[in-house]
Amino acid sequence: MESLLGLPVVIANTMPLPTTANATPILLGDLSQYVVATGGSRIVNIRERFIEQQLQGLILHQRIASGGQATGSVVALKLAAS
């Protein structure tokens, strides 16, 4: 396994490419201290817009937050535009 500064390296295809301007493609730190919290889900039914086609639409709103439990446990490295 590869490492960087003594930490294991994991490649995640969901992160932005390093070639993307002003992207944050690198997270460095103790990800066991990183938390993702969800809550406040709400579904809105929008029948009026699609009534002529006898269809209905749904919109889902959900609050999502994330961050490190300990200050400085995870650092995001942002690349400058070239």
Image: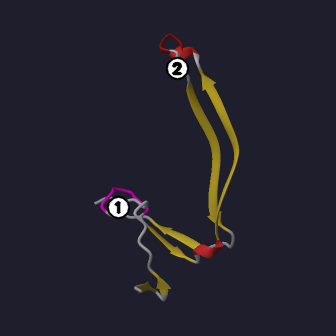
Tell us which disc is closer to us: 1 or 2.
2
Residue 22 forms part of the magenta stretch: yes
Q: Quadrant of residue 26?
A: bottom left
**Residue drawn at (54%, 13%) of the image:** 51
Q: Quadrant of residue 58?
A: top right
Q: Residue furthest top?
A: 52
| Residue at mark 1 | 17
**Range shown magenta:** 19-24
**Which is more N-terminal, label 2 or label 1?**
1
Residue at mark 1 to residue at mark 2: CA–CA distance: 38 Å
| Residue at mark 2 | 55
Position of residue 42 in the picture relative to residue 16 (left or right): right
Q: Quadrant of the C terminus?
A: bottom left
Colour basis: secondary structure
Residue 25 at least partly seen = yes
Residue 81 forms part of the magenta stretch: no
Please state which amino acid type lies under the numbered disc 2: Leu
The circle drawn on residue 7 is none
